[in-house]
Structure formats: structure tokens, C-alpha cells
Amino acid sequence: MLILSKVSKTYANHQVLASTDLRVLAHETVVLIGPSGCGKSTMLRLINGLIQPDSGSISFEGTLLTTDNILQIRQRMGYVIQEGGLFPHLTVRDNVIVMARYLRRDAVWIDSRLDDLVQLVKLPHELMSRYPAEISGGQRQRVSLMRALMLDPDLLLLDEPLGALDPMIRYELQLELKNIFDQLGKTVVMVTHDIAEAAFFGHTIVLMQEGRIVQTGSFNDLAKTPSEPFVEKFISAQRQPMAQLAKGLQ
């Protein structure tokens, strides 16, 4: 589905992403994880063509991404940015259908697709006439997912889609998102900073540090056979607060 070969990116003499290779299989969920500033979101923006690599190449379904074809290929990618990125001046319905309307899709097709997505994400149809500020954070994330799925893309890119939600809503949406991924069989590349969330969603976890991939594999691979001390330290750092809390409650 997706191949990154020797891809790198530098801003103002600071290398955000070192020369990177990555393969994403069709129908697989790949989770990018690591400390802030390690290059996770940059990699998503490179895949989506919002920024161009300084070196290397990106291929999507066998087609090399270029400045000439990226606008067309981007229609086969759904993208959910941090905190949803909904347009505040548009209703929920207009946010969801904005690209379909721009591409002049048939009105009957738009209405039918909208009905399917409302059912998929379990969002009340009466919310379609409201504005983003008039719905909850969890509902806004569902709307963002609907917008990303509107054109029935082959690839979903999600950048910390649940990061701004409170724990209970986040837990509920994790379950719903996992069910949606399984139901649709989409290829997913997702960014998170939470190792438990990465383990829950990811067929493959890609742990990054300072612009490079440190280790790729399942959660068990990273936990049981860390490739270097940073991997063990990163996992332990996220486990320790919960272990201390559990011990304190005993």
C-alpha cells in the first residue's frame, strides 16, 4: 500500500526526519509512537503530500507521489488532524461533505454516503445542522472521522485523533474506532504518544526517536526484545505511573 524509501526532512538546519524506510501493508494498522518532536506528525504530512521530502521517495499503491499527482492521489487518503480541525463556520453536515461538494459529486450520492457514515460512527442525524462549537469533543472527533471517510479512501491517516479527550470518552472512542477499522478493512497509519493505545490498535508499532525509527514490530516485540535501551526506557516510563497508582490503591 505504502512505501517510504530514504525519506528525510529538514527545517532551518534541524533534521526533523532522518533518512527513513517504511513499508505499510494493505489492511494493516501501523502506529507511529515516540516522544514529542520525534518526527511522527511530519511523516504523516509527507505521506499526505502537505510537505515535500528533501530526499527519498514515497509510493502509494505502486504510484510514486509527485507534486503533479498528489492532489489527485490525496483524494484516496483520509486525514484526521489533532483535535479534528473542523471548520467552525460550517455546519457538521457541510464539514463532512466539503470535499465531495468541491469535487462536484452527485447530490444523491452525497446524501446516501452521509447516511452510511452517520450510522457507522453512531452520531445522531439531528446533529448535522449544528456547528462544531455546539457539539461535544467526542462528537467532533466522530465528525472528523466522517469527513476523512467521505470519499471512501484506501488509506486513513490519523494524527493523535483522541489526544484531547477525557479518559472515559477516549476509551469509548478507542473501542468504536477499532470496530470501524475492523469493519471497513482500511489501511491505517496512526500517530499517538500512548503506548497502551498503540498496542490496542497497532498490527505494527513504529517507535521513533529524534527523527529516526528505533524499532518496528508488535508490542510484544518491543516489550520483550527491545532493540536498544531507549525502547525499554520508553515503555517502562509509560507503565510506571500506572503501576505506582495500582500499588497505592492496594
Image: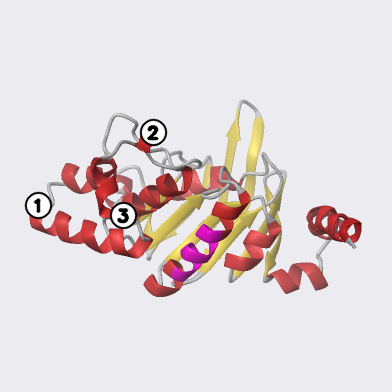
Of helix, strand and loop, which one carries label 2?
A: helix
- Image-based side of 109 in relation to 122, left or right: left
Foreground of the two, 160 or 53: 160
The residue pinned by badge 2 equals: 133
According to the image, what is the colour scheme of the structure? secondary structure
Q: Amino acid at mark 1?
A: Ala
Element carrying mark 3: loop
Is residue 1 shown to the viewer in this render? no
Mark 3 residue crowding within 10 angstroms, few (<14) / some (14–19) / many (20+): few
Residue 167 screen position, x and y as percent: 62, 51
Residue beneath label 1, please?
107
Residue occupying the far front of the picture: 250
Q: Say which mark, if any, is on residue 211.
A: none
Q: Give percent across and percent down for residue 50.
A: 42, 40
Q: Residue at x 72, y 43 (%)?
A: 210
Please report whichever mark, 2 or 3, sits nearer to the chain's N-terminal start.
3
User: Going from the N terminus, do you reach mark 1 or mark 3 first?
Assistant: 1
- Residue 128: where, in percent of width, then height? 26, 46
Q: Main secondary structure of the magenta part?
A: helix
- Tell me where the magenta segment starts and ends, as one range: 172-179
Q: Disc 2 residue type?
A: Ala
| Residue found at x 58% / y 59% | 171
Residue type pointed to by label 3: Pro
Q: Is residue 13 above or below residue 213?
A: above
Q: Find out whether the residues at labels 2 and 1 contact each other: C-beta distance under 8 Å.
A: no
- Is residue 243 rendered magenta in the image? no
Distance Cα–Cα, label 2 vs label 1? 26 Å
The residue closer to the viewer here, 31 or 213, is 31
